[in-house]
Amino acid sequence: MNIERDSEGGFIFSEVEEPLAAMFRAIPAAADPELNKAAFDRLYPDPFAGKDTELSAEWADYVQPELREGFENASTTVEMDLAPLDAGEEGWAIPRSHVDAWLNTLNQARLALAARFEVGEADMNRAAPYPPESERNLAVSQIHVYGLLQECLLQSLEAGE
């Protein structure tokens, strides 16, 4: 896989081989916490749980919807940017104006995967490779790949700005 910067400060990904392309296409689904309570609770933690039911209810009514909308908008942006991969192309572009959405969605995907598959620090620090023999091993690999992509985006932005 190659990553280059375009003239406007965006990123161009090319020569993406299928195993990585599959992981990248899975980002929006990985970031979606709706079908898993552990992932949902990790992304939308109630800061008043067990302390104040009234404040918990207000948080759920007023804060959580805005968080959800922000996450969903970012994920939709990522999904649109990845459309060329769905069309069989070997790359895609991230416009500079979409980088924040990507960083948000990658972080959300990593948190949701870790919660969904109960991935802990020991799993993340394991030296041996993770062959995708199980969904859990694949999730650990995805968390690592998404983290590397976040790091590449952030380092490149810091170096260029």
Image (tube, rainbow, N blue to C red):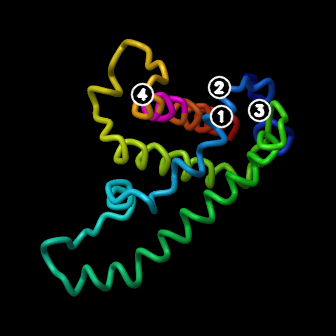
Indicate which disc residue 22 carries: 1
Q: Which residue is mark 2?
A: 19
What's drawn in magenta, residue-wise? 139-145
Label 1 packing within 10 angstroms: few (<14), some (14-19), many (20+): some
Could you tell me which residue is drawn at 55 percent across and 67 percent down? 70
Among the two numbered marks 2 and 4 on one chain, the one whose residue lies closer to the N terminus: 2
Q: Please tell me whether mark 3 sits on a helix, a strand or a loop.
A: strand
Q: Nearer the viewer, mark 3 or mark 1?
A: 1
Query: Which amino acid does the dot numbered 3 rest on?
Result: Phe
Amino acid carrying label 2: it is Pro
What x and y, as percent, mark residue 15?
Answer: 80, 24
The residue carrying mark 3 is 13
What residue is at 75 percent from the left and 54 percent from the top? 80
Camera-side residue of 59 and 126: 126
Front of the two marks 3 and 4: 4
Q: Is residue 18 magenta?
A: no
Rounded to the nearest whole Å, what is the CA distance between mark 4 and mark 1?
15 Å
Inter-mark Cα distance, 3 to 1: 14 Å
Give the class, few, some or many, for how many residues have Cα within 10 Å of label 3's Cα (few <14, many ≥20): some
Q: Residue furthest front?
A: 133
N-term mark: 3 or 1: 3
Label 4: which residue? 137
Quote the CA–CA distance across marks 2 and 4: 14 Å
Q: Quadrant of the N terminus?
A: top right
Of labels 2 and 3, earlier in sequence is 3
Q: Earlier in the sequence, mark 3 or mark 4?
A: 3
* 111 versus 63 height, above or below: above
105 lies above or below 46: above
- Find numbered disc 1 in the image and state the secondary structure of the residue it sits on: helix
Dot 1 and dot 2 residues touching (CB under 8 Å): yes
